[in-house]
Image (cartoon, rainbow, N blue to C red):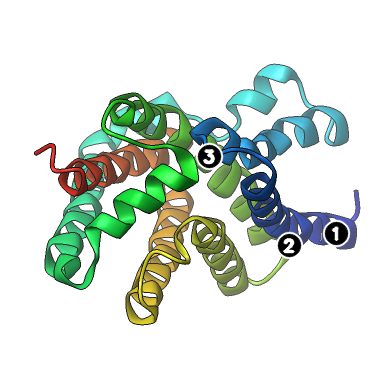
Amino acid sequence: MDTKKQTTLLLILLIVPPIIIFLSRQLFAANYIFSSIYKIIFLFPLFFRLFIEKKTLKHSLFENFSFKIFRKNIFSIMLIGFILASIYVSSFLLFKDWLDLEIIVIKLHELISINISNLIFIGLYIVIVNSLLEEYFWRGFMFQKLRRLIRPGMAYLFTGIAFSFHHIMFYYNWFNMTFFLIVTIGLIVYAMIMNFIFERYKDLLSCWLVHSLVDIAQIFIAFKIFNLI
C-alpha cells in the first residue's frame, strides 16, 4: 500500500470510532459492553498486518512488545506511571469542588450502566484489557504509522487530539465548558506523553504498564465518586 493510501486509511481510522460510539449510544441500551463496541476497531492493526503487510500471526500480535526492554526499564517506567497517576488524582482533588458528582454518577449509570455492584469488574477490565487494546492501537499502530508518514509534530498532535476526541463522546455533557476544556486538553497532553514514552522505549509493555497505573488512579476516583472509599 502506497504512502498516500496508508495516510488516508489512518486518518479515516481516527474518525470512525467516535461515529461508532455515537451510533451505539443511539441504538443500544445503556450497557458497558454495548457502549464499548467501537473498540473492535482496536483490532484493525491485526487485520492490517496479516492481510495487507502479509506478516505472520505471531508478528502481528506481538510487534512492538519487548519483555527485555520492559524488564530493563521497569523501575523508570513505574516511576513515570506513578507520577502521571498522582497528577490525575491530584487534579481531581484540586478541581472536585467544580464538579457535580451526583450528576456524574447519574450519567455513568445512564450511559454505560456503571454502578456500585459492577464497578470492580469494569475497573479490572479497564485496567488490564482496555489499556492493552488502546496501547496496541494508538501507540503500536496509529502513532507508529503516522510517525513514519507525516511530520513528527503532526503525528503527535493528530493522535493526541483523536485520542481525546474518542473520550469526549462519553463525557461531553458531564461538565461545564471550562472543566470540559481542562479535561480535553489534559487528555491530549496525556496521549502525547504516551506517544513520547513509546518513542523513547520502543515497547508496548512499558506503555501498557504506565497506562494501567493511570487507569488505577481513574478507578480510585470512580470509587471516590461513588463514596466507596
Relative to 186, is 10 above or below? above
- Up-down: is 17 above or below 121? below
Q: CA distance from mark 2 to mark 3?
A: 39 Å
Q: Nearer the viewer, residue 182 or 23?
A: 23
Q: Which mark is residue 3?
A: 1
Q: Mark 3 and mark 1 in contact? Answer it, CB < 8 Å.
A: no
Query: Which residue is depicted at the point 24% across and 50% down?
Result: 80
The quarter of the picture where the C terminus appears is top left
Name the kind of residue labelled 3 in the image. Answer: Ala
Q: Earlier in the sequence, mark 3 or mark 1?
A: 1
Q: In percent of the image, x 60 and y 42: which residue is there?
A: 137
* Residue that appears at 76% across and 20% down: 56
Task: Check disc 2 and report the residue beneath it.
Answer: 149
Say what secondary structure mark 1 lies in: helix
195, above or below 182, in the image: above
Contact? badges 1 and 2 (CB < 8 Å) = yes
Asked which quadrant contains residue 166, the reply is bottom right
Please tell me which residue lies in front, 66 or 164: 164
Q: Residues within 10 Å of mark 2 (few under 14, many from 20)?
A: some
Near mark 3 (Cα within 10 A), the count class, few <14, some 14-19 or many ≥20, is some
Q: Earlier in the sequence, mark 1 or mark 2?
A: 1
Q: What residue type is disc 1 on? A: Thr
Is residue 149 at all visible to an observer of this figure? yes
Q: CA distance from mark 1 to mark 2?
A: 7 Å
